[in-house]
Amino acid sequence: MSIFVDENTKVVVQGLTGGQGRFHALRNRAYGTKVVAGVTPGKGGQDVEGIPVFDSVAEAVAATGANASFVSVPPRFAGDAVVEAAAAGIPFVVCITEFIPAQDEARFYNLLRRDYPATRLLGPNCPGIISPGKCNIGITAGEIALAGGPVGIVSRSGTLTYQALNELSLQGVGQTTCVGIGGDPVPGTSFIDCLAAFQADPETGAVMMIGEIGGSEEERAAEYIAKEMTKPVVAYIAGVTAPPGRRMGHAGAIISGSQGTARAKMEALEAAGARVAPNPTAAGEMMVEVVRGL
């Protein structure tokens, strides 16, 4: 199985006629994902290499039965695009757009929770989701993923997501689903959301979790792991060498006092029973050992 998406997922791409949207949509389709429609207001009736373009998500859903959205539009319009998808009844929305102001993210995140609770938002500012051999929505290169499980991956860091996928695949360890939740301050999908889904997935035998400095999501995930997870978890926290008081990378990677440091997160995860690696390569090696013992 996989979480959130599968081989039957039908994707509408918001921003299909833009350069980035077109490029990644066609790559996703080439991977085997069912990219059934695009949306660009004012360009309805056109097509992009056989993918029909509509003026609205509602029109695309009515015509194609799309049940997932890939939002690839500029920051100014991303929030409205996410809400439009939810209002059209799309249950799963992936937003890769970066540089969205935190205030805007908080607004549309809370609007979704209030008015469209059936819609799950992944992102923004994330690489997306890939269920190897079934569905790829976003910017992850399908070539580095390996179908067959049994590892589920959830990560705040896009680059480290790719490294984790590649290192496991090179050692013959497949993945069920890899979820990049993004590093912005207001993520639509959290570590706990993904951990719970992996815990419930019968084909996922172990989970790799990649966090980074800033915020408290990893500590909250540690509490969940201690109370709810029966499957082994291997974790890595980026930013061990970050200078104190320095803002690093993602907008969410801001340390407040003693909270949010890599060391604090690592200690919380270790106390929860997770195996914590000192670097990404070691995390991959640890997971290979875990899989051998399943």
Image: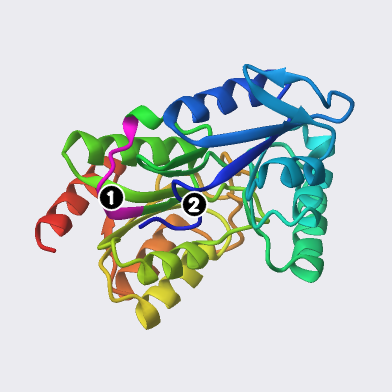
Split into 4 quadrants, where in the image is the N terminus?
bottom left
Residue range of the region highlighted in magenta in the rendering: 144-152
In the rendered structure, the answer to whether residue 128 lies left or right of residue 39 reads: left
Label annotation for residue 278: 1
Q: Is residue 269 visible?
A: yes
Where is residue 55 shown, x and y percent of the image? 85, 33
Q: Which of these two is toward me, 47 or 192? A: 47
Q: Write down the residue under mark 2.
A: 5
Q: How many marks?
A: 2
Residue flagged by tag 2: what amino acid is it? Val
Q: Within 10 Å of the Cα at label 2, are there few (<14), some (14-19), or many (20+) other Cα atoms?
A: many
Where is residue 87 shown, x and y percent of the image? 81, 56
Question: Does the magenta portion include 149?
Answer: yes
Q: Earlier in the sequence, mark 2 or mark 1?
A: 2
Q: Is residue 264 visible?
A: no
In the rendered structure, the answer to whether residue 62 lies left or right of residue 152 reads: right
Residue at figure coordinates x 61%, y 41% from the top left? 11
Residue at figure coordinates x 37%, y 62% from the top left? 266
Q: Which of these two is toward me, 239 or 168? A: 168
Question: Does the magenta portion include 127?
Answer: no
Cα separation, mark 2 vs mark 1, equals 31 Å
Residue at figure coordinates x 10%, y 56% from the top left? 292
Badge 1 marks a residue whose secondary structure is loop
